[in-house]
Image (cartoon, rainbow, N blue to C red):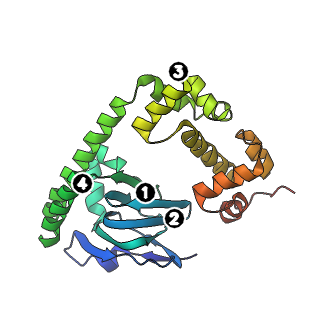
């Protein structure tokens, strides 16, 4: 895909501290990704959509709220019925000031180039968000009204994140950290379950309840992310990388990698690897 760059100076006029808009997404496959030099918050209040980046895709449903950092090429595509989104583009300096005053806000406004932050809002929270958005839409484009919208939103999300983290059993949190070691995820879901010291069925139920993932889903994500780093940073062959992450069936490796990054391992290497001698 080709790439275009959108700039804050072309969207915000002098004296405007934020931009607010609503739109219906096109269902056509994106022909180009666009980059931008500003933060953006958008949510899907009707239908389904897909966020496409260079690293993969993120399917969105009604109620999904997404925080985008600058420096992340992306595109949005509507899926199925009409997909309605609302988005807010705050002046970048306002976000910098907010993070300085409230450091915990940085989890939603990370450094440039960071991956999107996705949070789902249920019907009640989506209704609250819609009400706040209507007030923002009608308000003067000043810092006061921008912060009146953003601070309650990120405070609520931060509180929910802390509650969720606190609710995950300590044994599972510790096991998930240990699972990031290749020596653990090389053994697949069994490696993670062994770190938990619990029955597989109990681990699976607990992970589904707290993370919405199975042990296999979680481990395969770690494996594919590790494989992607190896493809970008080493000359190791595909079979060596697959073996290193504990996958001995190349068809299975390709299928998992494509599901994660929307391209084959070889395509990913060609796209991202620079100046590394390729294996024969």
Is the C-beta separation of discs 1 and 4 under 8 Å? no
Give x and y (percent) for residue 190.
63, 30
In the orientation shown, which residue stands out farthest toward the top?
197
Q: Name the residue beneath numbered marker 1.
A: 116
Q: Earlier in the sequence, mark 3 or mark 4?
A: 4
Mark earlier in primary sequence (4, 2): 2
Tell me if 74 is positioned left or right of 92 in this view: right
Q: Residue at x 70, y 64 (%)?
A: 267
Q: Which mark is residue 198?
A: 3
Quote the CA–CA distance across marks 2 and 3: 37 Å
Q: Which residue is mark 4?
A: 123
Mark 2 neighbour class, 10 Å CA radius: few under 14, some 14 to 19, many 20 or more: many
**Mark 3 element type:** loop
Q: Check contact, mark 1 vs mark 2: CB within 8 A.
A: yes
Label 2 sits on a secondary structure element that is strand
- Relative placement, left or right, of 200 versus 209 is right
Q: Residues within 10 Å of mark 3 (few under 14, many from 20)?
A: few
Looking at the image, tell me whether mark 2 or mark 3 is earlier in sequence order.
2
Quick one: label 1 or label 4, which is nearer the N terminus?
Answer: 1
| Mark toward the start of the polypeptide (1 vs 2) | 2
* Separation of marks 3 and 4 at Cα, in angstroms: 35 Å
């Amino acid at each position: 895909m080709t790439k275009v760059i959108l700039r804050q100076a072309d969207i915000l006029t002098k004296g405007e501290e934020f931009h607010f808009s609503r739109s219906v997404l096109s269902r056509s496959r994106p022909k180009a990704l666009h980059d931008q030099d500003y933060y953006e918050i958008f949510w899907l209040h009707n239908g389904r959509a897909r966020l496409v980046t260079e690293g993969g895709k993120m399917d969105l449903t009604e109620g999904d709220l997404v925080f985008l950092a600058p420096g992340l090429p992306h595109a949005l595509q509507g899926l199925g019925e009409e997909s309605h989104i609302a988005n807010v583009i705050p002046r970048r300096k306002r976000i910098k000031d907010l993070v300085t005053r409230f450091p915990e806000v940085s989890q939603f406004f990370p450094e440039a180039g960071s991956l999107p932050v996705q949070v789902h809002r249920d019907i009640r929270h989506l209704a609250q968000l819609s009400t706040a958005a209507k007030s923002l839409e009608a308000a003067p484009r000043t810092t006061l009204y921008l912060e009146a919208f953003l601070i309650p939103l990120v405070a609520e999300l931060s509180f929910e994140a802390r509650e969720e983290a606190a609710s995950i059993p300590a044994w599972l949190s510790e096991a998930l950290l240990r699972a990031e070691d290749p020596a653990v995820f090389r053994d697949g879901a069994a490696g993670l379950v062994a770190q938990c010291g619990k029955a597989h069925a109990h681990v699976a139920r607990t992970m589904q309840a707290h993370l919405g993932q199975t042990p296999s889903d979680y481990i395969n994500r770690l494996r594919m992310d590790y494989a992607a780093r190896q493809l970008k940073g080493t000359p190791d062959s595909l079979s060596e990388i697959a073996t290193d992450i504990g996958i001995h069936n190349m068809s299975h490796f390709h299928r998992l990698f494509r599901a994660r990054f929307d391209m084959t391992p070889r395509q990913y290497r060609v796209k991202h690897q620079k100046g590394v001698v390729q294996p024969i």
